[in-house]
Image (tube, rainbow, N blue to C red):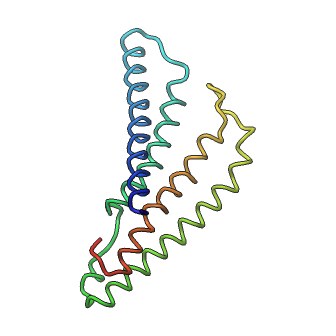
Amino acid sequence: MVSKVVDKVTDATRIMVGVAAGVMTFVIVIEVILRYGFGRSLYFAEELSRLSFVWAGFLATSLALRKGVHASVHLIVDRFPKVPQKWVIVFSQVAVLFFLIVIFVAAITVLPHQWRQLTPTMEIRMFWFYLSVPIGVGLMIIQLLPQIQRALKGEEQ
């Protein structure tokens, strides 16, 4: 049941990353064509592409965590016997979970202060930039919990 929910969240995240990356790419391509081809510019291109980039980046971190492609060092852990290796992996995952929870709480406390601040060009509330942090970290937590569960069972990651 939990794995099906996580799979659905992963599918939705992939779609959102694709949309954010697509918007960013489209806006930048149009901006380059307009600027160098016609000597004109979109006044909102920089802000919209930056907003899309931030969202794509924070959303994609959860997909990278799911695939296990974040930077890690297995040189020492791989030399341990099976049982201690399992507990070192569980400990490291729990440490990452704790770190993510700290970031999530800190990001949530910052959000209300960003509601009044607007971006200079499009006048988008900075709240929408900052919201990407707790959403991205929350998605990482969702992806990490099944990995901790598998590690406790001794299953391969």
Residue 79, picture quadrant: bottom left
Left or right side of 78 for 124: right
At 47% from the left edge and 11% from the top edge, which residue is drawn? 40
- Residue 59, image x and y in percent? 45, 48
Between 138 and 73, the one nearer to me in the picture: 138
For the C terminus, the image quarter is: bottom left
On the image, the x and y values in percent for residue 2 come to 43, 63
Return the x and y of residue 126 as percentages of the image width and height. Answer: 65, 39
Question: At 74% from the left edge and 47% from the top edge, which residue is drawn?
Answer: 113
Seen from the viewer's position, the closer of residues 54 and 101 is 101
Q: Residue at x 51, y 29 (%)?
A: 46
Residues 104 and 120: in front is 104
Residue 50 in the figure: left or right of residue 67: right
74 to 8, vertically: above or below: below
Q: How many marks?
A: 0
Please, is residue 82 above or below residue 151 in the view? below
- Residue in the picture at 52% in, 36% down: 51
